[in-house]
Image (tube, grey):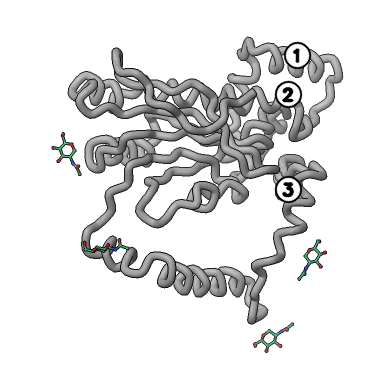
Amino acid sequence: MYSKLHQLVQLLALSSAAIRSVVAQDNTTDTTTSNSTLAALADGNAAFMADIATTDPGLLQNQTIQGQAPKYLYLGCSDSRVPEGTIFNAKPGTLLVQRNNGNLFYTIDASLQAILGSAVYGYNVTDIIVMGHYGCGAVGAAFVPPPPPPVDAAMAAIQNFVDPMRELYRTSTREEVVELRDTLAQDGTATLPGYDDPGFRALVEENVKANVERIAASAIIQDHYYSFGENQPVFIHGLVYDVSTGQVYNLGVSVGPDGVPIPEVPFPLVS
Ligand SMILES: *[C@@H]1O[C@H](CO)[C@@H](O)[C@H](O)[C@H]1NC(C)=O
Ligand SMILES: *[C@@H]1O[C@H](CO)[C@@H](O)[C@H](O)[C@H]1NC(C)=O
Ligand SMILES: *[C@@H]1O[C@H](CO)[C@@H](O)[C@H](O)[C@H]1NC(C)=O
Ligand SMILES: *[C@@H]1O[C@H](CO)[C@@H](O)[C@H](O)[C@H]1NC(C)=O
C-alpha cells in the first residue's frame, strides 16, 4: 500500500526540465553549518532575524504590542514551491493564510469557516485571494483514476481531496479541458500531463474560479455583502502562480458586492 501511495506522489512530482533547473540553481542560500536535517531551517531562521532587524527595526516588537491588522486573506495550495510570504515579498503581518491540497474552499471545512469569519468580521480584510498554481499535484491527480480498493489510510485521505477535482475535470466545458479529456479517454492511459499542457493549465485555472465562486456564495460573504455592502466591500480574487518563473497572474474572475466596481487587480491578465 505504501508503495502505491509513493507511486502516486512520484507521479505528481512533476519532472519538467524547467522546474528541475529552477530547483538545481537554488543552492545559493545554503549556509548549513551542521548535519542535522533541520540545520537549513535553523540557519534560515537566524538569517531571517538578522535581516529583519536591519530592514525593519521595531516591526516585530510593534506587532507584538499592537497585534495584527492584515488586509488580505490568502487561500493557497500546500505545495512547498508556492510560499505566499516569499512570492509577494510580504512582511509578517500582511496576510492571513490558509493552505490545503489544491486551494479548496468548502463550507463544511470548519477551519476555513473560522478563518474566513475572523478575516471578514474580525480584521475587516479588504481582499480575499484564491491562488492556484500550474503543475498542481492535487489538480493533476484528477487525470489519474482512483486506485482500486483496498487503500490505506493515507491514500484514502488523499483521494477525499481529489474527488472534487475529478468532478471538475469530468464536467468542465472549457475547450482545453475537453480536448485533454478526449485525448486521455482515447489513450486509455493514466498519465499526468506535462506542466505546460494547455488542458492541465486550464483545469488549474478552472479550479481557482470554482473556489472563488464557492467563497462568494458562502453564508459568511453573502451575509457580509447584505449587512455592509458598498460601505465596507470585500473583494474575492482568483490568481494563479507560475512555478517556473515566479510570476503571479490575474484570472479576471474577481467578485465583490452588487453595484460596487471591482478595483484594479495589478497582476498581468493570464493569456
Ligand atoms: C550551485 O548549482 C549550480 C548549478 O547546479 C552549480 O553550477 C554550482 O556549482 C552550485 N554552487 C554551489 C556553491 O554549490
Ligand atoms: C553529525 O554531527 C554529529 C554531531 O556534531 C557528529 O558526531 C557526527 O559525526 C556527524 N555525522 C556526519 C555524518 O557528519
Ligand atoms: C513602531 O511603532 C512606532 C510607534 O507607533 C512607530 O513610530 C514606528 O515607525 C514603528 N516601526 C515599525 C518598523 O513599524
Ligand atoms: C471592522 O468593521 C466594523 C464595522 O464597520 C467596525 O465596527 C470594527 O471596529 C472594525 N474592526 C477593525 C479591526 O477595523
The answer to the question of whether label 2 and label 3 lie on touching residues, with beta carbons closer than 8 A, is no
Q: Secondary structure at mark 1?
A: helix
Q: Nearer the viewer, mark 2 or mark 1?
A: 2
Q: Nearer the viewer, mark 2 or mark 3?
A: 2
Label located before the other in sequence (2 or 1): 1
- Amino acid tagged 1: Glu
Label located before the other in sequence (1 or 3): 3
Residue 164 location, x and y as percent?
Answer: 55, 25
Q: Which mark is residue 18?
A: none
Residue 50 location, x and y as percent?
Answer: 47, 74
Residue on which the image places disc 2: 198
In the visual, does 24 lie left or right of 108? right
Alpha-carbon span between mark 2 and mark 3: 27 Å
Question: Assess mark 2: CB under 8 A from ligand 1?
Answer: no
- Amino acid tagged 2: Pro
Q: Which mark is residue 6?
A: 3
